[in-house]
Amino acid sequence: MLTIFVSRRKQRIITADGSRMKVRRAYVRQGGQMQYLQEPETFEDLSGVRIVVKEWCKLRRLPRNDKVEQAIIKFLREHHAKQNIKFDCYAFANLTHGVEVHPCCYLHKHWDTKPFDGRLEVGGAVFFITPGKEMSNFHHAAIYIGRGLYISVYGAGGDLEISTLRDMKKFYKAKQVLLGVPCP
């Protein structure tokens, strides 16, 4: 079982396209030592994943969601540290919800969306957009993991990062957040 420890502290990252953002520090224990989630080159023997958040002086385990757990495992096995530019935040949202692979310009064909009202179940998908006529106004996609935190891939070929809705909206310069549910 891999445990991902999420700190209250933030760190600056630079995405593949040169964007500067802040995300929560995330660590894993491998070989008896703590490392940033992005440092290990491989994650081979994963039987499960749990996410633990440090809040003040306590560690709190986030609720389990099978879809999210399986998507994290698949990402860490197949895409982590590979810098595959065909795999991005939208691909991770599709992977989590079992939606066929497709470009984000077809979002409304595969996802029912509505304005995000602040309520979301663990495993729910959100999309960051700027309203307009074209899907070129799509900025980011993320999956809710509980306690105000979201997990997503930051940029094409990027790695898993954990952040808040507020920070993602700010750093991706999105004007609106949509709740997404896969079309039947």
Image (tube, helix red, strand yellow):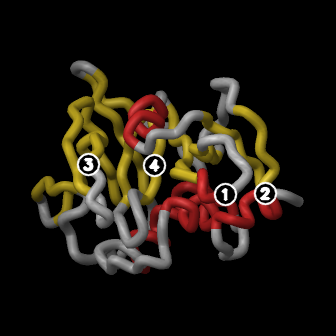
Q: Residue at x 26, y 59 (%)?
A: 18
Task: Determine the CA span between mark 1 and mark 4.
Answer: 22 Å
Q: Earlier in the sequence, mark 4 or mark 2?
A: 2
Query: Given the image, on which type of amino acid does mark 1 rest?
Result: Met
In this picture, residue 7 sits left or right of residue 61: left
Circle 1 residue: 135
Percent across and percent down for residue 165 are 48, 33
Contact check, label 1 and label 3, Cβ < 8 Å: no
The mark that comes first in sequence, 1 or 2, is 2
- The kind of residue tagged 2 is His
In what element is the residue under mark 2? Answer: helix
Q: Secondary structure at mark 1?
A: helix
Q: Which mark is residue 108?
A: 2
Which residue position holds label 3?
Answer: 20
How packed is label 1: few (under 14 Cα within 10 Å), some, or many (20 or more)?
some
Residue 151 has which mark?
4
If you read the primary sequence from the N terminus, does the residue marked by circle 3 or circle 4 appear first?
3
Compared with residue 139, is residue 58 higher up or lower down, i.e. above or below?
above
Badge 1 vs badge 2, beta-carbon distance below 8 Å:
yes
Q: CA distance from mark 1 to mark 2?
A: 9 Å
